Amino acid sequence: MSIINKLAVTAIIGGLAFGAYHTHSADKAEEQTFEAARQAALDAPDPFLELDRFRSAIGDYGKSCYFFADANCKRRTEAENELVVAGARKGSVPALFFLFNSGIRWPPISYTNLPDNESQRLGQRLISLAESAPVTKENSALFSEAAALLKYSTQTAKAIDQYVKAWQTGAPWAASELAYVYDEILNDKTRAYFWYVRARNVPIGTEVLRACRPRKS
């Protein structure tokens, strides 16, 4: 190999090594930024409310995963889940509502992902908040989520109380939920009919309607 060729090979190897070094340094800096932002969010009074600040601090780290999630993507998702749970543990009402909300959301953490004893404890906290909350429009979703936790338990009466409060705030869907509880869970056709009417969803020709019609003399 000529001297020129040797120099060329050396330059290529050196360039690759230089690039690898700087890539490693950049990755390490990103990881340090990520960890610092994560810890700062966890140390905040309400980690859940720090989600946007955390995302802003880490930028695109682990963001574009598409179909194949790499380690950074998993780490980002796990950290965001961690902030939601940490917020709920610290008593954050928004975090509690997020955990028990049955809708689609991100990060994909739910109370069903937690150990049973913890999900029950946090669920009871949500119910207590709903029971003491004023009957205002802002709390209608809180009443609904608390009722959803209660309606299949031995505390159906408490679920009804929460759905009634939601109805009183002006939530039209609460009537349908109350009709369902009375009809399908308690088999109370008269009260079910009362709420079906308010939901404007009377099941024509069904047992509910026949049972509630006035009898001919």
Image: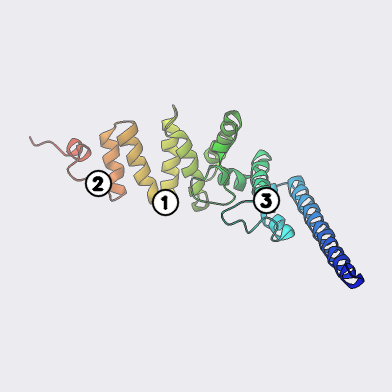
Q: Residue furthest top?
A: 154
Kind of residue indicated by mark 3: Arg
Kind of residue indicated by mark 1: Ala
Kind of residue indicated by mark 2: Val
Q: Is residue 127 above or below residue 75?
A: above
Residue 137 in view (yes/no): yes
| Colour pattern of the rendering | rainbow
Q: Is residue 80 left or right of residue 102?
A: right
Do residues under tags 1 and 3 come within 8 Å of each other at their CB atoms?
Answer: no
Q: CA distance from mark 3 to mark 2?
A: 48 Å
Q: Quadrant of residue 122?
A: top right
The count of marks equals: 3
* Residue 70, position as x, y percentages in the image: 65, 51
Comparing 135 with 42, the one in front is 42
Q: Earlier in the sequence, mark 3 or mark 2?
A: 3
Q: Residues within 10 Å of mark 3 (few under 14, many from 20)?
A: many
Q: Quadrant of the N terminus?
A: bottom right
Q: Is residue 65 above or below residue 97?
A: below
Comparing 7 with 208, the one in front is 7
Disc number placed over residue 171 in the picture, else none: 1
Q: CA distance from mark 1 to mark 3?
A: 36 Å
Disc number placed over residue 76 in the picture, else none: 3
**Label 2, on which residue?**
202
- Residue at position x 59%, y 43% in the image: 96
Q: Earlier in the sequence, mark 1 or mark 3?
A: 3
- Residue at position x 29%, y 37% in the image: 191
Comparing 213 with 108, the one in front is 108
Give the SS element for disc 1.
loop
